[in-house]
Amino acid sequence: MKKLLFIMNTMGQAGAETALIQLLHKLASTGEYDLSLYAIIPCGELFRRVPKRVHILNKHICRSSVLSFPGHLWIAGSVLYSYFYRLMGFRMLGYMVRNIKEQKSSGRKLQYDKLLWRLLATGRPGRKEPYDLAVAYIEGAATYYLADKVEASHKAAFVHIDYPKAGYTPRMDRDCYRGMEKIFVVSNEVGERFCEVYPQYRDKVRLFRNLLDREGILRKAESGTGFTDGFDGIRLVTVGRLHYQKGYDIAIEALAKLRQDGYPVRWYVIGEGMERRNLEMLIKKYQVEENFILMGARDNPYPYMKQADIYVHATRFEGKSIAIEEAQILGKVIVASDCTGNREQIESGYDGLLLTLDIENLVRELERILDDPELRKDYAEHVLEKKMDFPADLESMLALLDEGSEHCKA
């Protein structure tokens, strides 16, 4: 039986982690593979959804949200452990300083979390047992760990985001992709953006679109009560963590303008994150406390998505949004920003609407679609035509197992 290892940064409730759970269930259902999972920070709600046939290699795990108090403690403990593991934190000070300087000189927002991924990966003991295929299912620590700490006959990495916009650089990565046989990207644009950073690895890049449990999503959308607030106006819904990337600051001001223009609209956000306090201040500033609702995380967001009049995904950048795909399965009218990933998911003017992300555009396009119920009906009908199943993608990853068996060692 072939041994497969999947590596993640955390198991928090987010898009890549959700896609991995579906992939693990797909592989476990065949009974053909010996499956293992290792998380750099062994914390997150999605540990509860790991199939029983998958071996979790972490000795201790936390099933709380990475954003909860126990989750914060686990993250802090993981950073401290890595910092003092063989005094790795002291040895990496030069790396940290160089990359902070590079971020500042480029004019990008400082992203200390990206620097911590290298510390977390380096400050972990390696895997001693060899695997037939080892996969880093996300960027950052998981990929660094696979490159340096795992022995496997074949290695592959996944990229889920707009790589340069997310803040990754070759100096930060230390050429971790050199030893990967294949680099799987979730959309063609994600692949192109990755190749802008690493043109030398273009021949390794392959498309692997997110696996989705269509029947499960439809079934869960019928369970639970959904909204209970008695609101009888127009519901806008967004699912995603509370992060600068997701553009909620723009959404809050846009909602205030919609209300001023007389539209009976309420905007619900399902997700949690470190930006909550800042967003709450903006909500208060624009006096939309009753109509811009931060609902927090939900184990089952699908009843709320199903009950939405419009699903909005106005993000600054993406890789490929699982939330958009889930909304499409539920037949929702979708308004999204015209950015990497979103462009491959929506045919603007046919099954949804893409817009340049700023407050004026967002307000104008939402008002246009709100004023045209026939247009909303057309979008909702066309979105159900979307193809969501791509079995050849999985076959291309498993084909690595049939290739030569020369080991890629750490």
Image (tube, rainbow, N blue to C red):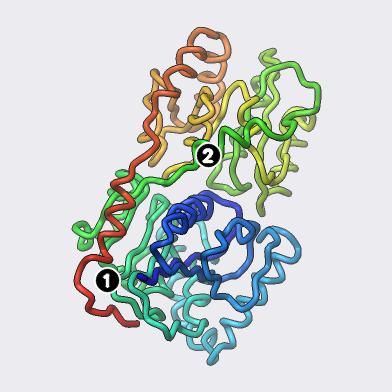
Q: Is residue 201 left or right of residue 286?
A: left
Please, is residue 36 above or below residue 232 in the view?
A: below
Front one among 178 and 393: 393
Residue pointed to by mark 2: 323
Closest to the camera, between mark 2 and mark 1, is 2
Identity of the residue drawn at 25% across and 59% down:
399
Quarter of the image with the N terminus in it: bottom left
Residue pointed to by mark 1: 178
Please, is residue 409 above or below residue 396 in the view?
A: below
Q: Residue 155 placed where, x, y %? A: 32, 69
Identity of the residue drawn at 51% across and 14% down:
376
Quarter of the image with the C terminus in it: bottom left
* Rendered image quadrant of residue 12: bottom right
Identity of the residue drawn at 39% across and 18% down:
349
- Where disc 2 sits, the SS reads helix
Identity of the residue drawn at 42% across and 52% down:
160
- Residue 108 visible (yes or no): no
Front one among 152 and 165: 152
Q: Is residue 45 left or right of residue 246?
A: right
Front one among 43 and 359: 43
